[in-house]
Image (cartoon, grey):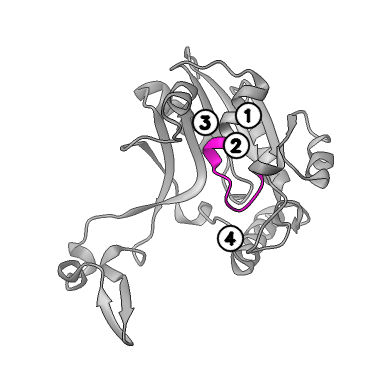
């Protein structure tokens, strides 16, 4: 993968988590959750750097066992209300990452342990080929579609889109949703706009089976089963 672009991976891993307590360091398929992302990123040789940003001592100890960088995150950037764009800006400033249209940050959340190195490589290649401000990984699931979504009002279902709700599945356009696995954005765009992605980011489509984003104990259980099965083969 040859280009004038440079890619710097950022793994954000704050200590707080309401859905799954201390999930980033919790064991999954025999090792801390964050290590799945660390080991995946380290297999992508085209990355200029890999950095973990955290306020957590255990996360720092785990990270020190790998050939990656670590920065201590300010407590004000570690709360439930902290914005990721501010975390990224802090990282750019602390690490003196160049701010220009050819330098990109790859945000790799530890909560997506099923991504594989080729996902990151393919997403970077899309950036090289298209030079967008931003890219987001997405997935398609036929049962998760606006046509199948409702509000409940006075115990009655109210379709989000009445016209779509009456169509057969074969008549619906494909619908994609963010899977939380890969976000890529230029440092110039982040600093100039204080946003991580623009109105129409480039899409990198991932299969549903690699798109689990751990937010709940159930997600954790499913990911653990899939990772354990994968390790045994």
Tag 2–tag 1 contact (CB < 8 Å): yes
Q: With 55 as the anchor, is 140 left or right in this view?
A: left
- Locate residue 170: give its quadrant: bottom left
What residue would you read off at disc 2? Answer: 87
What residue would you read off at disc 3? Answer: 121
Residue farthest along the bottom direction in this orientation: 155
What residue would you read off at disc 4? Answer: 215
| Residue 160 circle label | none
SS assignment at label 2: helix
SS assignment at label 3: helix
Q: Residues within 10 Å of mark 2 (few under 14, many from 20)?
A: some
The answer to whether any part of residue 118 appears in the image is: no
- Upstream in sequence: badge 4 or badge 3: 3
Mark 2 vs mark 4, foreground winner is 2
Which of the two residues, 219 or 10, is positioned nearer the viewer here?
Answer: 10
What residue would you read off at disc 1? Answer: 91
The span from disc 2 to disc 4 (Cα, nearest Å) is 20 Å
Magenta residues, start to end = 78-87
The span from disc 2 to disc 3 (Cα, nearest Å) is 24 Å
Q: Is residue 42 above or below residue 161?
A: above
Q: Residue at x 38, y 60 (%)?
A: 141
């Amino acid at each position: 993968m040859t280009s004038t672009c440079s890619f710097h991976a950022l793994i954000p891993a704050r200590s707080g988590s309401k859905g799954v307590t201390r999930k980033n360091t919790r064991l999954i398929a025999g090792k801390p959750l964050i290590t799945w992302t660390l080991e995946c990123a380290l297999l992508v040789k085209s990355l200029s750097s890999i950095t973990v940003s955290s306020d957590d001592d255990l996360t720092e100890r785990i990270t020190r066992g790998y050939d990656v960088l670590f920065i201590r995150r300010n407590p004000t950037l570690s709360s439930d209300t902290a914005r990721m764009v501010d975390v990224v800006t802090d990282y750019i400033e602390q690490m003196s990452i160049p701010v220009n249209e050819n330098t990109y940050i790859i945000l790799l959340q530890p909560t997506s342990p099923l991504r594989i190195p080729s996902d990151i490589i393919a997403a970077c290649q899309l950036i090289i080929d298209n030079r967008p401000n931003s890219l987001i990984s997405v997935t398609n699931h036929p049962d998760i579609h606006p046509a199948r979504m409702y509000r409940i009002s006075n115990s009655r279902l109210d379709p989000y889109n009445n016209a779509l709700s009456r169509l057969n599945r074969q008549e619906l356009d494909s619908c994609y949703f963010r899977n939380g696995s890969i976000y890529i954005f230029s440092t110039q765009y982040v600093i100039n706009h204080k946003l991580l992605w623009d109105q129409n980011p480039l899409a990198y489509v991932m299969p549903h089976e690699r798109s689990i984003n751990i937010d709940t104990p159930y997600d954790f259980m499913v990911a653990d089963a899939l990772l354990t099965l994968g390790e045994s083969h």
